Image (cartoon, rainbow, N blue to C red):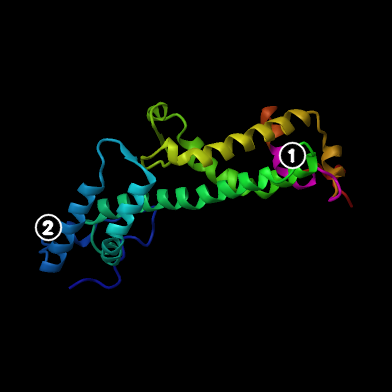
Amino acid sequence: MINKDFDRTIDPFEWQPGLDAALDFVPDAEYTDLLHRSDAAYADILTGDVLNYRLVDLKSVIDQYTELFHEVEKELKYYEGFDRFFYLFDAVFTAYLFMDQEGWNAYFALDDYSKFDMSVERNLTNWLFTYQDLNEKIAEHLFYNSDCDCNSQDYYRISHLGIHIHKEDLAKIFEFSTLYAEHYAHLLKQYMDITWEDFLSYTEEDQMYYLRDNLFYYILRSRNMEYAPIPELLTPS
């Protein structure tokens, strides 16, 4: 009988062996059927030594195996036999969410960019501030994997679990990321000589107010300095 208190997934940082790892474990028909189906799905999802996908292929995998994933999810707390399917599907699903959500967000950000005169610094800083979170989320997927050898080909790695997406499907994400980085770098260079006094003097009426914290952090990094608390003597009373 299964110990109802046993949950091998309760701590994601401490992997536990499943009950099916025991030498005296005898699988029942339901376990065997689910294991066979999850192993077959795992083999089907694999695209070779490198996991190369088009966005439409990711969607197809998700549509086909979501129900099985939820079946396996209920048993994962007890058994380890389903691990490889579960974690591979989870990686595919996470990659698809990134592509779908951030792809659309990048599209809307680029559309928003086209509606304003970005030669006006206030418009530019407002746009950079508005899409700062999007840029950071995209950077987590793209730049973390930027040294992958596969990236020189048609596919680009977007996941530390090895999911690669065709560059055509990443076009809007790349376009937004490049545009954001170029403008941010320009502002960074423009304000390289900023001081703590200048930093603290910004108010909501100033163009740089909404970007000042993050911008100053990158300025300090460019100077090979650690980000430190604002000096007490300069803190407004």
Q: Nearer the viewer, residue 206 or 173?
A: 173
Specify start and end residues of the magenta stretch as a single range: 204-217
Q: Nearer the viewer, residue 208 or 18?
A: 208
Identify the mark nearer the N-term, 1 or 2.
2
- Dot 1, how many residues are within 10 Å of its Cα: few (below 14), some (14-19), or many (20+)? some
User: Per the image, is 77 magenta?
Assistant: no
Q: Position of residue 58 (x, y in %)?
A: 35, 49
Q: Position of residue 65 (x, y in %)?
A: 28, 58
> Residue flagged by tag 2: what amino acid is it?
Leu
Q: Nearer the viewer, residue 171 or 200?
A: 171
- Dot 2, how many residues are within 10 Å of its Cα: few (below 14), some (14-19), or many (20+)? few
Answer yes or no: is residue 135 visible. yes
Q: Position of residue 111 (x, y in %)?
A: 62, 46
Q: Give left or right: position of 83 versus 174.
A: left
In the rendered image, which residue does mark 1 sit on?
118
Residue at the spot 49% in from the left edge and 38% down from the top edge: 171
Residue found at the far front of this picture: 115
Quadrant of the frame with the N terminus: bottom left
> Residue flagged by tag 1: what amino acid is it?
Met
Q: CA distance from mark 1 to mark 2?
A: 67 Å
Badge number at residue 23 = 2
Residue at the spot 40% in from the left edge and 41% down from the top edge: 160
Give the structural element (helix, strand or loop) at label 1: loop
Q: Quadrant of residue 117?
A: top right
Q: Is residue 45 above or below residue 74?
A: above
Q: Quadrant of residue 164?
A: top left
Q: Give left or right: position of 17 versus 95.
A: left
Count of numbered labels shown in the rendering: 2
- The mark lying in front, picked from 1 and 2, is 1
